[in-house]
Structures are given as structure tokens and as C-alpha cells.
Image (cartoon, grey):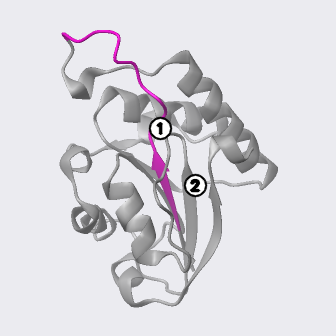
């Protein structure tokens, strides 16, 4: 069994127009909304074996906040530049190099790719994965490369506004 956690980065700041898009930091409001989701994850005793994140500041900050709360070593977060510009099909590429010894993977990225990838696997589609939203899906397989064809079930879809 493999479990995927798709996370959209927390709400970011547009306060500094001189910054490149990938340099935009999180808003405090984004951090506090992420903590609402973290409380939900902790209440379900969620742990992750691997976290991969976009290199964009807002995504990596989100990944670090969640990693710290889940007691995942921050230095073990894998930063993947490809996630930043990825579409949902390119996000699928992130699974192929994951060791099958890992049972769970958290992918921290951006829309529309996160929403589109979630909808590829979800039984009940979502309109839009909001900032700090998390989708968890389990797959009946022992190999990450077989995710696409594996039977799956939705564990949860959680948004800060739902909490």
C-alpha cells in the first residue's frame, strides 16, 4: 500500500512586486491556515516517509512547516525545481524515482497541477485545491511506478476553511 499526500502551498504574499513569483514568501495568514491543516493531520496520526517540494519559497516554507510538525527531518525534504512549472502529468514523474521502501509521499506544489493530479485519482472531483489544502489517497500497490493503474481510495480531502 502506498499513500500520497498532495499539498498546495500556503497563502503567499504579493506585497513585494519586485520579487520573482518563485520568491514570494508566505503570509502569516497562510501559516496559521496551514497549522489548522497540521492539527487535522496530527489528529489522524499522519506520518510521511518522504517529502518532495517545489523550490518556490512559498512551497518550500510550507513543506518545512509541515515537516517540522510531523517530525520529518527538514534536511531530508527533496527540492524539485520541476514541480514549479509542472502540469499534472509532469507531477506523475515525481513518483518514478521514489524508492518502493517508502510507503508514503507528500508532494508540495502549485495549482493548477495539484488540483488536476488530485482529480485524476479522486472518485469525487474537486473544483480547486485551495492554499494549504491536502488530498490523501492510498493505492493498492507496492510500487510507486504502478500508481496510475492501482486500485485506490480517497482517505481525505481537507481545506483550512473546512476546519
Residue 91 located within the stretch drawn in magenta: no
Q: Quadrant of the N terminus?
A: bottom right
**Label drawn at residue 48:** 2
Question: Is 64 positioned to the left or the right of 66 in the image?
Answer: left
Label pair 1/2, CB-CB below 8 angstroms? no
In the rendered view, tell whether residue 89 sits above or below residue 143.
above
Residue in front for this viewpoint, 135 or 150: 135
Residue 8 located within the stretch drawn in magenta: yes
Mark sitting earlier along the chain (1/2): 2
Q: Quadrant of residue 69?
A: top right
Which residue is located at x 69 percent, y 55 percent?
A: 46
Q: Which residue is identified by label 1?
A: 63
Numbered range of the magenta stretch: 4-18
Question: Is 153 positioned to the left or the right of 145 in the image?
Answer: right
In the rendered view, tell whether residue 26 sits above or below residue 121.
above
In the rendered view, tell whether residue 110 sits above or below residue 95.
above
Residue at the extreme front: 127
Q: Residue 88 placed where, x, y %?
A: 28, 64
Q: Secondary structure at mark 1?
A: helix
Q: Residues within 10 Å of mark 2 (few under 14, many from 20)?
A: some
Tally of numbered tags: 2
Which residue is located at x 48 percent, y 70 percent?
A: 101
Q: Residue 79 placed where, x, y %?
A: 31, 41
Q: Residues within 10 Å of mark 1 (few under 14, many from 20)?
A: many
Amino acid at each position: 500500500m502506498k499513500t500520497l499526500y498532495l499539498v498546495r502551498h500556503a497563502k503567499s504574499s504579493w506585497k513585494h512586486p519586485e520579487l520573482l513569483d518563485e520568491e514570494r514568501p508566505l503570509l502569516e495568514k497562510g501559516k496559521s491556515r496551514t497549522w489548522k491543516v497540521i492539527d487535522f493531520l496530527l489528529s489522524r496520526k499522519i506520518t510521511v516517509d518522504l517529502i518532495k517540494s517545489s523550490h518556490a519559497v512559498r512551497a518550500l516554507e510550507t513543506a518545512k512547516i509541515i515537516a517540522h510538525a510531523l517530525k520529518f527531518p527538514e534536511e531530508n525534504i527533496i527540492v524539485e525545481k520541476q514541480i514549479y512549472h509542472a502540469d499534472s502529468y509532469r507531477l506523475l514523474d515525481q513518483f518514478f524515482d521514489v524508492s518502493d521502501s517508502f510507503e508514503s509521499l507528500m508532494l508540495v506544489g502549485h495549482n493548477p497541477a495539484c488540483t488536476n493530479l488530485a482529480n485524476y485519482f479522486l472518485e469525487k472531483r474537486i473544483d480547486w485545491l485551495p492554499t494549504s489544502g491536502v488530498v490523501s489517497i492510498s493505492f493498492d500497490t507496492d510500487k510507486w511506478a504502478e500508481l496510475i493503474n492501482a486500485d485506490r481510495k480517497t482517505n481525505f480531502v481537507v481545506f483550512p476553511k473546512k476546519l
